Image: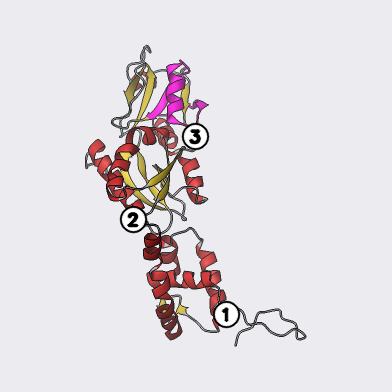
Amino acid sequence: MVFCAGDRPAVPAIRCPVNIHHLELFYYVAKHGGISQAVRRMPYGIQQPAVSSQLIQLEETLGVTLFHRRPFRLTPAGVELYAYVEPFFGQMDAVTMKLRGGSIRHVGVGASEIVLRDHLPTVVNSVRHTFPHLKMTLREGYQSQVEAWLDKGEIDIAFTLLEDRSPKTFNHIFIAEIPLMLIVPRRSGVKTAEELWNKDRIDESLVTLPAYEAMCKNFQAGLTKKRIDWFPSIEVSSLKLIETYVVNGYGIGLFLDIPATRLSPELRSLTLPASDFPPVRFGVLWRGKPTPVVDAFIESTRARARELFGRGKTA
């Protein structure tokens, strides 16, 4: 018999109830064969130490060891408990789907303005063939913003640039490589990027996203290899604002060479070779096990990427 710790002798002991959330965590750990594997597949974000701590609490409450950690293996008590909880937690997605009328009704999406404007409509049209009653909330933001929204549960899926080291709380999938380019006013005398590199000093202002964004890091890495110093003069929060400031004569903009993106007619693009300036990696982020609608968005985005880039630089 297990009692709550800290009970005073004068007070009747009260049996600690089993925490349902602890049972849910145990279900995922048993199902996926370990704590780290479960954390990557759970439908919500939770850190590995927190899962481990709560499972220890569950074992203390029950007074048994449920599984061996290394290598992972359920004990007889763990096997018995999993057989008991699996019918409930294993059917939760199906029951949720049924109560919602057979499909997920709402999804929150975060992406840059260009993705939302020029590319997401094609993706959504494809997804709606499977989920005709889908409702969406679309939020415009750059990389760090959409990651923050996803981390807080304010959106369900993010379309953004991928860093080499993605946050552990997110699942991600690579979609395509996107080359970098520069944009200049159409009236500018600069015809190629090489003209800039041949200057003793680049006097034109550089307009970019914040320096910690992946495209900026890759661009500065390329400049470093060329032993060129050219740092941002104006940092803005979106690619659209880069366009706006370049059109108005504030400098040269660092941009992404995304096929089918509609640049202002007042701008020209300057190619940056991938051999000198590494392309950025574009992909999809989500938390926990992907829902059917997230899977549909991923597959539709892959199809859109193949249409734009071809198969050579896509997942």
Where does the image place residue 274, in percent across and percent down from the top left? 31, 34
Residue 254 higher or lower than 8, as above or below: above
Is 162 on the left or on the right of 126, as rendered? right
Residue 4 inside the magenta-drawn segment: no
Asked which secondary structure carries label 3, the reply is: loop
Q: Nearer the viewer, residue 277 or 227?
A: 277
Question: Rounded to the nearest whole Å, what is the CA distance between mark 1 and mark 2?
Answer: 36 Å
Name the image colouring: secondary structure
Earlier-in-chain disc, 3 versus 1: 1
Residue kind at label 2, given as amino acid type: Pro
C-alpha distance separating marks 3 and 2 = 36 Å
Quick one: which residue is furthest to the right in this view?
10
For the record, the magenta segment spans 226-255
Three-letter amino acid code at the position of disc 3:
Ala
Q: Residue at x 32, y 32 (%)?
A: 258
Q: Residue at x 55, y 73 (%)?
A: 19
Of tags 1 and 2, the one toward the viewer is: 2
Residue 117 lies, in percent from the top left, at 37, 33
Q: Secondary structure at mark 2?
A: helix
Up-down relation of residue 300 to residue 246 (above or below): below
Q: Which mark identifies residue 60?
A: 1
Instruction: Please state the total of marks drawn on the protein image.
Output: 3
Tell me the tag on residue 119. Answer: none
- Point out which mark residue 211 bears: 3
Q: Give the camera-side residue of 174 and 221.
A: 174
CA separation in Å, label 3 and label 1: 49 Å
- Rate crowding at label 3 as few (under 14), some (14 to 19) or many (20 or more) other CA atoms within 10 Å: some
Who comes first in sequence, dot 1 or dot 2? Answer: 1
Above/below status of 159 relative to 190 = below
Which residue matches tag 2? 292
Determine whether the residue tagged by mark 1 lies in a helix, strand or loop: helix
